[in-house]
Amino acid sequence: MANIKRFLALPTAFALLALALVSPVSAQTIPMLSVTAYTQIQTVVPRGADNANFATITLDARNSSEDIEVRSLPIRLVAGAGADVGDLDNCQAYNAADMDSALNTGDNVDDLSAGDNTLTFNNPLTVEEGTITTLWIQCDVAADAALGETFQVNVMPITSIEATSVDSDEDLVFPTSSVVGTGSVIAIGDVGSVIIPPPVVVTPTFPNTGNGGDAAGNVAVIALSLAVLALGVVGIKKYAR
């Protein structure tokens, strides 16, 4: 019996250590938000189009311990191929999960300029912890826009984003705060260009740990611990024979 106990001691200790490394982290409170420009399939929009999609942007709170309220979105508009920014009008942000109304309307719909811009929302947009929210940036295109001119909407370094935690006064953590997220280059095509629905980035099925860490990694550690423990039990059975 003493030999069996010694045989079981190592895998048991390993499993307990792994679980201990996971558990304390889960108790931390870290409001966290990542903002990313997502690559689109649609790269040509017809001139004269209304609500043409020029950017797909994700607000990622999967690793946050709290809900996040976002009040504005800083973007950078790059006009290429001699493009006239005046060919874009009524540029608005939409929550892909609720297309009934834009996030910025009325006085918050400003003419975009080449360079840095801020889309200010009428009301705070809540990004729930453990989820991803997809935003679409859509504009009307002038009927006489030049064929071939291009536009690109990039995500600004998000230290300038106006966002707060819903549940606490904790400062937000921005994992990509120094990065300019590069969006797709969208070209103006002729009338009749095929319109492809923009993508919606769905929340993966891994559970939110609420700790600012990687849920998938924690699941993997737990699974490995259980596997080692199971091997120890198998070894005991063989040893006992």
Image: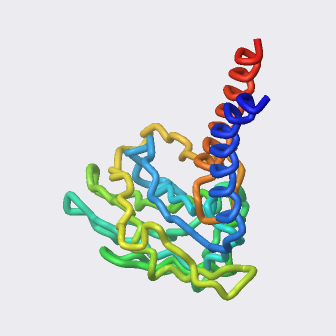
Task: Name the residue at 43% across, 60% down.
Answer: 141
* Residue 7 percent across, percent down from the top left: 67, 31
Query: Could you tell whether 231 is left or right of 188 in the image?
Result: right
* Residue 159 percent across, percent down from the top left: 45, 80
Q: Nearer the viewer, residue 132 or 147?
A: 132
| Residue 223 to residue 134: above or below | above
Q: Nearer the viewer, residue 183 or 230?
A: 230
* Residue 210 percent across, percent down from the top left: 69, 63
| Residue 228 to residue 165: above or below | above
Task: Name the residue at 23% across, 60% down.
Answer: 80
Residue 132 visible somewhere in the drawing? no
Quarter holding the N terminus is top right
Count the numbered circles shown: 0
Task: Name the residue at 56% across, 43% down.
Answer: 197
Quarter holding the C terminus is top right
* Residue 37 percent across, percent down from the top left: 44, 58
Task: Name the residue at 20% across, 62% down.
Answer: 82
